[in-house]
Amino acid sequence: MATLLPPPKRQKLYHGVEAPVPEPPKPTSNIIVQFVSEDDGTSLAPAVTLPANFNRANLEALVNKLSSRDDDPAPFAFHVALKETVEGAPTRIAIANSLEQDVLDHPSKQFTTEDIFVVQCSPQAVFRVRPATRCSSTLSGHSAAILCAAFSPTGGMLATGSGDNNARLWDLHTETPSHVLKGHTGWVLAVEWEARERILATGGHDGHVRLWDPKTGKPLGDAMKRHSKFVTSLSWEPIHINPTNPRLASASKDGTVCVWNAAQRSHIYTLGGHTATVNVVRWGGARNGVLYTASSDRTVRVWDAESGRPLHTLKEHAHWVTTLTLNTDFVLRTGPFDHKGKVPESDEEAQAVALARYKKLVDANGEILITGSDDHTLFLWDVFGTSGTKPKARLTGHQRQVLHVVFSPDGRWAASASADRSVRLWDGRTGKFIATLRGHVADVYRLTWSADSRLLVSASRDSTVKIWDLKTYKIHTDLPGHTDEVYCVDFVADKIVSGGKDKTLKIWKN
């Protein structure tokens, strides 16, 4: 008997049409790639020939293999610098998919397969923060606009200051209000956590500085009164310098900066020298403690924190200096707490951990600051490095006042927000322009970075909060929900908090 063949397989039909024939994979050409370190430009490995469609994950594995380090593989970010740039256009291409997709097919058409591709590699944080996608809580309680918000160093609590003359503490584990801090007789303009989370300091429109116990919400003694006008900014002494009883600095519209002993709530000394409002004070960790102050008298001053003696006066800005950031801001603010969440047992342990974190960051580049002004420009200074009182770079491009500037936690990036509705990204070590982030339709008030330096968040007058993708320089996630201007935003672990004119606090998470 003849063998019966099975009937031919029925062709799958898509709405009555036969399935399209799968396309054969496109042939790809080989290219020569040279991996260099973004930090110092040294070659990480000899030049290699790779297929152009070699993807990003493979590039990362290859760099780890070629650089022959024995420890665990490190995550890297890759980019290629553009040869020619147009004013305001990005100056580098981040590699998100493959060299073929991102660089060879780039609209600028500056690269061909004949070129040697110099790929800059920058090490990334070993942990990854998830981008927020939804609003998990909307918390009301304040009866006026929320003017400032700050996470505690461990990320377990949040403090907010408002135009209703109160500060409030919120528990972030349960996302509920925990205490109302009553005492100021004017708007609360600044809240600042001591880096071991033992004390919260608030500064108000009444010119008073108050200290609070965050566990009980009770005031620690009376208000500290020295300023004749409102308090603009507060800053604590770093934990790696003074772990037991850090001092507090407060800046005011009266043109002075007061330094306080927090344990005795006593005034130690006043820094006079500015002739107008001191807008920002920062307590840096260089040279056993220095104070940086930015003022509306167009100068930035650097003081020795031990004696209160002036060290440098930085004069380059042509208008009020309204914002200042240090590349060490994040490690000084979080002190001994990192992503592992270990709590130090003693002051000595806290000091050792905080010092190790600080040293790791400043060993390569020292303590750098960027100042932003109403003259539409920013300056990058390396006061204790080679450039001294001359700026290392002038950062231009904004069309209107610079409202906020902030370094990423690893010090590799800096971002500036402006009244021209844009955010600009800069190289945190050289001050070179990287890209403009456009998407807001009104002034951008505040910026904050995730702890792994991979995500940037902005808050704006247009009532939205936006998360930016630093590979494409486009919006990653838009977080609408506020009904009015957003004045403050902060980022801890994988939570973002924002507050503003609509009197509500919103917590966003993944």
Image (cartoon, rainbow, N blue to C red):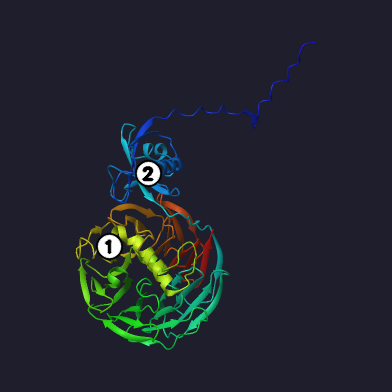
Q: Quadrant of residue 111?
A: top left
Residue type indicated by callout 2: Ser
Residue 417 seen in render: no
Quarter of the rendering occupied by the C terminus: bottom right
* Depicted 480 relative to depicted 254: above or below: above
Instruction: Give how far apart the Cα atoms at labels 1 and 2 are.
Output: 42 Å
Q: Earlier in the sequence, mark 1 or mark 2?
A: 2
Label 2 CA crowd tier, 10 Å (few <14, some 14–19, many 20+): few
Residue type indicated by callout 1: His
- Across and down, in percent, residue 434 comes to 32, 51
- Across and down, in percent, residue 217 comes to 51, 81
Q: Is residue 61 left or right of residue 247?
A: right
Residue with the mark numbered 1: 376
Q: How many marks?
A: 2
Give the residue at the far bottom of this rendering: 222
* Depicted 414 relative to depicted 320: above or below: above
Q: Quadrant of residue 93?
A: top left
Q: Is residue 308 left or right of residue 120?
A: left
Residue at 23% across, 59% down:
392
* Depicted 76 relative to depicted 440: above or below: above
Residue 111 seen in render: yes
Give residue 36's mark.
none
Residue with the mark numbered 2: 67
Residue at 29% across, 72% down:
288
